[in-house]
Image (cartoon, rainbow, N blue to C red):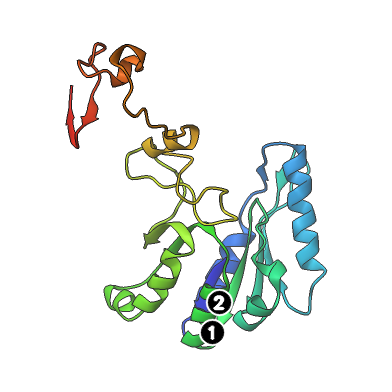
Amino acid sequence: MVFLSNDENVAEFQKQTISHFQEVEATPMLNKGIKLAFDSGVEHLLNNKVSVTLIAKGKTNSAGFRGSAHLFETTAKSFIEKEYLEEENFGPSTINILADSKEELLASARKMKGHLTATLFGTENDLKNNTDLIDILEQKVGRLIVNDFPTGVEVCHAMVHGGPFPATSNSRSTSVGTAAIYRFTRPICYQNFPEDLLPEELKTDNPIGIMRLFNGERKR
């Protein structure tokens, strides 16, 4: 989904976006099931012409499970009213959503369910003038990005590839990054245990020499 302020710049943005979409080659998808689901999602949008309009389509190629790029357009008012417009269609398609006012843009953000990422494109002043939008998006996504794209998920300490439901079933964790280990752990406390019954990792003299948090201090 791409949210746009319906101002004097939007026509040129749409013109260039449409031109680029029309040049996109049909790209292979992971498997037949994903391709069929993508086609079904596109067909669903095509059949709802009252609320959404197809404004550009990429090149077609019937070889293999290739998906053609689709660019749709709708209004923020329709997005707020129609639940299906927020449903993910996994593949090369998106919807440009035109907001006639900042109030419509904020209302659209409040209406959103959980997502993995959100990107804000704008100048430094744009960002300062829209901190209310940032405050809303912080509660809606796992990764908030400025003037960059969310592709190429890096495995690092800072990465969060998760978000509020339905982006993930556990909004406190991530599926990519070093913190992902917590998706597969369950806390358990051994209180007042004899030393010989404790796991090796928890014995006072640390027989296996691992780095531990001991009385709030990291040490071996």
Q: Is residue 133 above or below residue 39?
A: below
Question: From the viewer's perspective, is 99 left or right of 92?
Answer: left
The residue positioned farthest toward the right in the image shown: 47
Q: Which residue is drawn at the image coordinates 32% and 40% (left, top)?
A: 157
Residue 202 place in picture, x, y as percent: 30, 21
In this orientation, which residue lies closer to the viewer: 72 or 191? Answer: 191
Q: Which residue is drawn at the image coordinates 50% and 74% (left, top)?
A: 13
Q: Which mark is residue 198?
A: none
Q: Which residue is mark 1?
A: 104
In this orientation, which residue lies closer to the viewer: 118 or 162? Answer: 162
Image quarter for residue 220? Answer: top left
Residue 22 place in picture, x, y as percent: 64, 61
Residue type pointed to by label 1: Glu
Question: From the viewer's perspective, is 58 left or right of 10?
Answer: right
Q: Is residue 76 above or below residue 91?
A: below
Classed neighbour count for the residue bearing mark 2: other residues with Cα under 10 Å, few (<14), some (14–19), many (≥20):
some
Q: Which residue is mark 2?
A: 108
Residue 51 place in picture, x, y as percent: 73, 78
Q: Which residue is drawn at the image coordinates 28% and 78% (left, top)?
A: 125
Classed neighbour count for the residue bearing mark 1: other residues with Cα under 10 Å, few (<14), some (14–19), many (≥20):
some
Residue type pointed to by label 2: Ser
**Marks 2 and 1: CB-CB under 8 Å?**
yes
Q: How much space separates mark 2 and mark 1, taking CA atoms?
A: 6 Å
> Label 2's element?
helix
In this orientation, which residue lies closer to the viewer: 171 or 178? Answer: 171
Q: Quadrant of the N terminus?
A: bottom right
Q: Is residue 137 above or below residue 131?
A: above
Q: Is residue 71 above or below residue 34?
A: below
